[in-house]
Image (cartoon, rainbow, N blue to C red):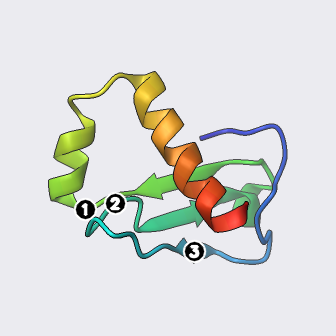
Amino acid sequence: MKVPYVFWDRSAEIIGHVDAQKGRWARWVNLAFYIGAPILLGVNSATYARELETRTQAQVVAEAMDVLGSIYG
């Protein structure tokens, strides 16, 4: 996801997240660390990723932002 600015720790290569639902948005790759752009690549487990395939892009983005909001406020 490309966002307007980096609101996370720019020096972290990987951001881990433990959710109540196993595998849900478990890792984030901080592309700002590598290329300087405010982009996070969210990684989900195979089971949860299959669930996401049934949703619209807007729903997936909203959920990802909810998770990031729970991490960063």
State the CA–CA distance, disc 3 to disc 1.
Answer: 16 Å
The numbered dot on residue 68 is: none
- Against 50, is 16 above or below? below
Residue count near mark 2 (Cα–Cα under 10 Å), binned few <14, some 14–19, many ≥20: many
Left or right of residue 20: residue 5: right
Using the rendered view, name the quadrant where residue 65 is placed: top right
Task: Label 2, secondary structure: give it.
Answer: loop
Query: Which quadrant of the figure contains the C terminus?
Result: bottom right
Horizontal and vertical percent position of residue 6 = 81, 54
Q: How many marks?
A: 3
Label 2 sits on residue: 24
Residue at image coords 82%, 37%: 4
Task: Label 1, secondary structure: give it.
Answer: loop
- Against 61, is 7 above or below? below
Label 1 sits on residue: 45
Q: Nearer the viewer, mark 1 or mark 2?
A: 2
Residue count near mark 3 (Cα–Cα under 10 Å), binned few <14, some 14–19, many ≥20: some
Using the rendered view, name the quadrant where residue 8 is placed: bottom right
First along the sequence among labels 1 and 2:
2
